[in-house]
């Protein structure tokens, strides 16, 4: 389940900040052995401070402190030919680390607690990682984690 590039759909996801649990996609960006992983909770919410015609790829707005990787709802993103239903945003300021043991404990049963949506196509996953690691706005500790 917690393999780099996997997109997992949790039903529901238990947020670290205590928000009410809700169904949520989760993208495993990097796994550090069996201890921790870096992941994104992608969203359909457009938080970009500008109206732009870009609907796919890396967007960096350093003056607003925003790094975003957009995935169009028309783009097939997994090796099993799936795409998101809506245009999806992965914000650099929202990536976070998670303890592997807590995730495995909270989401023990595939098909009940979670579903593996698919593994991202290599090219798209590489573009996502490059977008995050080349950003001026992503936390250095997360960039270092991605580069480890």
Image (cartoon, helix red, strand yellow):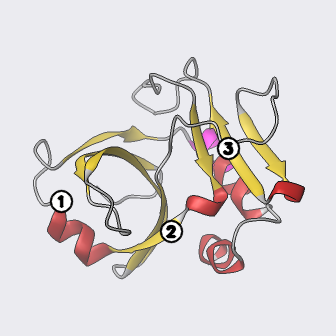
Q: Residue at x 15, y 50 (%)?
A: 113
Which stretch did the figure color magenta? 122-126
Badge 2: few (under 14), some or many (20 or more) residues near its Cα, within 10 Å? some
Q: Which residue is mark 2?
A: 96
3D distance between C-alphas at marks 1 and 3: 27 Å
CA distance for labels 1 and 2: 18 Å
In this rendering, the answer to whether 113 lies above or below 148 is above
Give the residue number, with chain letter if any, for mark 3. Answer: 69
| Residue at (78% x, 42% y) in the render | 49
At a point 69% along the width and 47% down the height, the residue shown is 68
Q: Is residue 23 above or below residue 145?
A: above
- What residue do we see at 81% from left, 29% from top? 51
Q: Is residue 83 left or right of residue 11?
A: right
Identify the mark at residue 56; answer none if there is no mark. Answer: none
Identify the secondary structure beneath mark 2: strand
> Mark 1 or mark 2: which comes first in sequence?
2
Residue 125 covered by magenta stretch: yes
Provide the residue designation for mark 1.
107
Q: Residues within 10 Å of mark 1 (few under 14, many from 20)?
A: many
| Residue 132 x %, y % | 70, 58
Quadrant (top left/top right/bottom left/bottom right) for the N terminus? bottom left
Q: Secondary structure at mark 3?
A: strand
Place residue 14 in its image quadrant.
bottom left
Q: Quadrant of the C terminus?
A: bottom right
**Quick one: 117 or 121, which is closer to the camera?**
117
Judged from the image, the secondary structure of the residue bearing numbered disc 1 is loop
- The total number of labels drawn is 3
Q: Residues within 10 Å of mark 3 (few under 14, many from 20)?
A: many
Q: Please report whichever mark, 1 or 3, sits nearer to the chain's N-terminal start.
A: 3
Query: Percent from the top left, x then y, of residue 117?
Result: 33, 37
- Of labels 3 and 2, earlier in sequence is 3
In the image, residue 137 lies at what x, y percent? 77, 65
């Amino acid at each position: 389940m917690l393999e780099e590039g996997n997109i997992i759909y949790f039903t529901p996801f238990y947020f670290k900040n205590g928000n009410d649990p809700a169904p949520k996609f989760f993208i495993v960006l990097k796994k550090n052995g069996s201890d921790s992983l870096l992941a994104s909770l992608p969203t359909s919410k457009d938080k970009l401070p500008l109206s732009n015609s870009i609907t796919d790829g890396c967007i960096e707005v350093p003056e607003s402190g925003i790094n975003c990787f957009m995935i169009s709802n028309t783009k097939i993103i997994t090796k099993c030919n799936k795409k998101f239903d809506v245009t999806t945003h992965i914000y650099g300021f929202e990536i976070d680390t998670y303890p592997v043991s807590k995730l495995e404990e909270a989401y023990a049963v595939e098909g009940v607690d979670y579903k593996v949506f698919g593994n991202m196509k290599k090219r798209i996953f590489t573009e996502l990682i490059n977008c995050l690691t080349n950003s001026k706005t992503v936390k250095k500790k997360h960039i270092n984690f991605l580069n480890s």
